Image: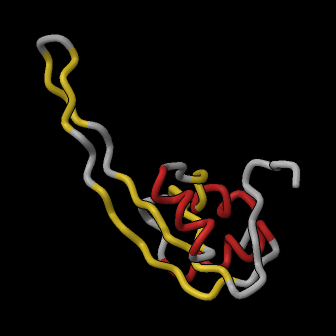
Amino acid sequence: MNPERIYQILRGPHVSEKSTTLGESAGQVVFKVGRDANKLEIKKAVERLFEVQVKGVRVVSLKGKRKGFGRLRGRRSDWKKAYVSLAEGQNIDMFGAPE
């Protein structure tokens, strides 16, 4: 897998209250991923980019929200997120926080 494809698969971390809680308690990390990415590609991309062992991947496809722009009605793009479970003792430090 070339580095360009890794960054097409993993768009970035998804930061929310739920994802933070999962990271602390269950050893999971949540990513925004490309809509064409599958579980195997996500697993390989995370293992190669962060040099960790991945135990499992769950994927959720989300519909874009309907939004109003003045008198016009619009819709945001659909997107996909992946819940990545890490093996025991593995950790990804997303934001480089000091210990």
> Left or right of 12: which side holds 38?
left
> Left or right of 27: which side holds 74?
left
Q: Is residue 66 above or below residue 10?
A: above
* Closest to the observer, 65 or 88: 88
> What x and y, as percent, mark residue 51?
82, 74
Quarter of the image holding residue 71?
Answer: top left
User: Which residue shows up at 18% across the image and 11% down it?
Assistant: 70
> What x and y, as percent, mark residue 44?
67, 78
> Left or right of 86: which side holds 90?
right
Q: So how many labels did they put on this image?
A: 0
Q: How is the image coloured?
A: secondary structure
User: Which residue shows up at 55% across the image and 83% down it?
Assistant: 40
User: Which residue shows up at 52% across the image and 80% down it?
Assistant: 57
User: Which residue shows up at 73% across the image and 76% down it?
Assistant: 47
* Closest to the observer, 21 or 85: 21
Quadrant assignment for the N terminus: bottom right
Q: Which residue is at the far top?
A: 70
Quadrant assignment for the C terminus: bottom right
> What x and y, as percent, mark residue 30?
54, 63
> What x and y, as percent, mark residue 68?
18, 23
Quarter of the image holding residue 56?
Answer: bottom right
